[in-house]
Amino acid sequence: MIFVTGATGYLGSYAIASLLRESDARLALLVRARTAAEAEAKLWRAMQLHLDPSGFRRLLGRVQWVHGDLTLPGLGLDPERRRALAGEVESVLHVAASLNRRSERACLNVNLRGTLSVVRFAMEVAERGRLRRFTHVSTVAVAGRRDREHVREDEAVDWERGDYDPYARTKKFAEHMARELLPPGTTLVLRPSIVMGDSRRPETTQFDMVRAFCVLADLPVLPMRSDARLDIVPADFVGEAIARLHLATRPAHGIYHLSAGADAESAGAIAGAMAQGLGRRPPRFVPGLGPAFDRLVRAAAVWPRRDAVQRLGALLSVFWPYITFDTVFDNARVRAETGLRPAPFTSYCVPLYRWATTHRFRYPYAELPPAVATAAVQVHA
Ligand SMILES: NC(=O)c1ccc[n+]([C@@H]2O[C@H](COP(=O)([O-])OP(=O)(O)OC[C@H]3O[C@@H](n4cnc5c(N)ncnc54)[C@H](OP(=O)(O)O)[C@@H]3O)[C@@H](O)[C@H]2O)c1
């Protein structure tokens, strides 16, 4: 049985959809929900991007609900049930995190305290001699401040380097903690780069980065170099890579970048594809405006009125460093191990832009049809 955190999130849903295809493993899903009905509704919200109601019903047949919260003592689980669960679980897939780059508190609580609790649970599984793998979904942001670099997995964490934000800082220490505390050879660290959209279809349920991309795509002048590379990957590649690496019998490495690597495209190539696809003039690239633009979005981010200007500033100020650091993350390992190669962003950025702007950055969620009864086994916290 695989114990999974973050299944109700964006990448968690992709990982679950791939795990369903790639294995017949049972899944114990830690979900922040008080009842099975609430957990089911949350999971359906995440999974409807991947499954129709009957496919979802089949998924529920493989699911145990674990009602809990990373920030509660002992994950919020009843000690007896926790012991029983530790006797059933063989691997842990830890996807959950706070991506709130502006909140030190949320990042500390979820990414550090929460990961420590998940690691402690995995240690209990290991004490029973059962822990096959602890897969920790991290981020390339652990590489800290970079400028025009090509970063390989084992060189990414540099403790002398500053971090862009609390998210990057806490994710960096969380992966260190897992590797230090768990038995050697059990921890697998997977670091996606910038994840945007799905290469097979335009729909998405995650909008922050997509919104920032669409705002920039509408500007006639871009305050950056046209040859700056953007390491962007689609969620379908990331989900499939997470599942395959988690299930792999003996992965060759302990850390993998789930990234575009040397194939990462430049801002100019992406702007060119957008201009061609939308029938527009390509933007002008004026890198000299970069510092002024940076100051402008930072000022807008702390604008006293919480209006559209403030929201836009907050959004862009968070992502701007990641857009302009012109750094790619080597992906030779994931390509060799899984045979997967991420689709280039230029092959799907236009439909993504069209769909996201037409739908005003909202996914049209459908209610779960009543025919889908609760088939999952409830696990009491
Ligand atoms: N998306 C990206 O571009 C990207 C890039 C690189 C790395 N990553 C990494 O990928 C992982 C997944 O990211 P995502 O984009 O899928 O994030 P997401 O959509 O925000 O999902 C976060 C998940 O974590 C769960 N969670 C948050 N706080 C929790 C808590 N206190 N207790 C239990 N569960 C909690 C959420 O549960 P609820 O449904 O209850 O909120 C949700 O299932 C993260 O580790 C992130 O660092 C993401």
Image (cartoon, rainbow, N blue to C red):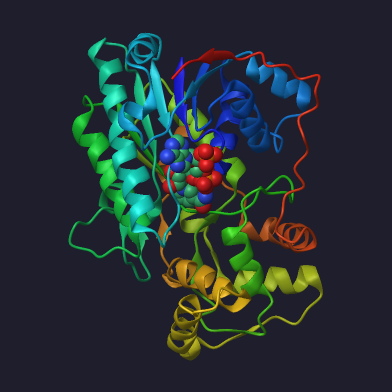
Residue name at image x 31 percent, y 61 percent = 144
Residue 207's spot in the image, x, y percent?
62, 56
Near-viewer residue (174 or 25)? 174
Near-viewer residue (312 or 326)? 312
Note whether residue 73 is visible. Answer: yes
Q: Is residue 130 above or below residue 339?
A: above
For the image shown, how many numbered marks are present on the structure? Answer: 0
Which quadrant of the view contains residue 114?
top left
Residue name at image x 45 percent, y 30 percent = 245
Residue 117's spot in the image, x, y percent?
30, 31
Q: Is residue 301 above or below residue 252?
A: below
The quarter of the picture where the C terminus appears is top left
Near-viewer residue (306 or 365)? 306
Left/right placement of residue 92 relative to residue 163 reads right
Left/right placement of residue 39 relative to residue 356 reads left
Which quadrant of the view contains residue 309?
bottom right
Residue 373's spot in the image, x, y percent?
73, 16
Note whether residue 336 is visible. Answer: no
Residue name at image x 47 percent, y 16 percent = 380
Left/right placement of residue 87 relative to residue 39 reads left
Q: Is residue 298 above or below residue 381?
A: below
Residue name at image x 48 percent, y 75 percent = 301
Residue 298's spot in the image, x, y percent?
45, 79
